[in-house]
Image: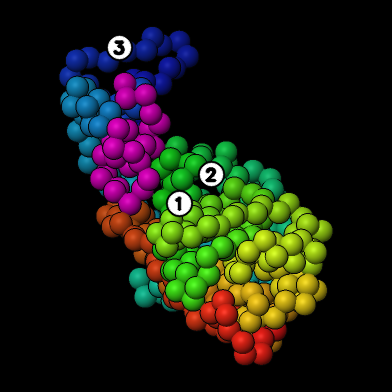
Amino acid sequence: MEHPEATPRRGRPVARRGRAARPRQAEVARLAGVSQATVSLVLAKKASVAISDETRRKVMDAARELGYVPDPAASRLAAARNNLLGVFSFTATFPTEVQHSYYPFLVGVEQEAASRGYDLVLFTGSSPGGAGAGGPEALGRVRLADGCLFLGRHIPTDQLSRFVDEGFPAVHLGRRDELEGLAWVGADYVSATRDVVAHLAGLGHRRIMLVREDDEAPASTDRERGFREGLAASGLTGEVVRLAAPDRELTPARVRAWHDNGVTAFVAEETDTASAWRELVAAVRGAALAVPDEVSLALLGSPPSDLADDPPPTGFNIPRPELGAAAVRLLASLVEGDPAPEPLVACTFRPGTTSGPVQRTAQGVL
């Protein structure tokens, strides 16, 4: 809150601040060269928020130089809340395929919020077809809650940065490093993908290919990082193929050519569209390659509902309810001013039936 003398009034000169005036966070921010929200997060010791050590040092040095001390009245005002947590999705929250929507996340969100005495407010205006979709007023409505949980593979960082700058409690469900100060909770895709590669290496595979969509979503880059780390740890040869249009680029002829050149295992990522996995399965079938006799397949996540009747793929399960609960714990801690770090949530390895030894002779399962 600004001091009265800091606000000009018509017809009255603005009083100059004396040496005894209390330094404000805005002054600390200017001296440190950071946003006021970052100052607030650092001084509140919010270790769970992604702020670099260098930034924290600059803020603390500036605070000491200015003699900054917290304003107890402002702290009490900031503590006022309605016990409401918001949930805001940048994609459709309620598609017809409930099993593969945000429903499992929301189960964990609801249970954890209830256990902590919070009610939930679901903001759907930004969903495709929703009222005010994509408009700035859609995000502004979340201020009705004490804090908000955001979901979506691709997010508008320019809009979310306003919340970060203003110190509004916000948590993204899924790793986000491009916006400093935004807290997030995510699945440990790196370790889970390394485990899948290690499993394939243990079956004798020496050349493995990762098929992924051509974007920079953190969930995809984490999987690729785990894939490359797994290859290095096992001494394997591998490739990463990015596809802008899997339905056109992932053909039976292309898969057959890769296999003829020594690729014995294919790994695909799970995304909202499931395009990479769906087209990989179709191309392998079209190439008449028996799974897992001639080629092994692995999915870094869960299959789409239209392939639910297929044999369970080797890969890992994403702990969606646990992620939702962890996100609520972090958000509640930010709202209450006593944040605790939330670790990455581990995924569970799924043996499946789509991988086998390179020289396996039993009948394929696809």
Instruction: Tell me where residue 217 appears, x and y as whole percent.
Output: 58, 51
Query: In the rendered structure, are the residues bearing label 2 and label 1 in contact, judged by CB atoms less than 8 Å apart?
Result: yes
**Is residue 308 left or right of 169 when viewed as pictured?**
right
Q: What span is in magenta?
A: 31-56
Question: Which quadrant holds residue 260?
Answer: bottom right
In what quadrant of the picture does the C terminus appear?
bottom right
Q: Amino acid at mark 1?
A: Ala
The Cα atoms of the two marked residues, 2 and 1, are separated by: 9 Å
Residue depicted at x 25% and y 25%? 62
**Is residue 253 left or right of 142 when viewed as pictured?**
right
Q: Amino acid at mark 3?
A: Arg
Q: Which of 106/322 is in front? A: 322
Residue depicted at x 78% and y 57%? 249
Q: Of tags 3 and 2, which is closer to the observer?
A: 2
Q: Amino acid at mark 2?
A: Leu
Note whether residue 28 is visible: yes
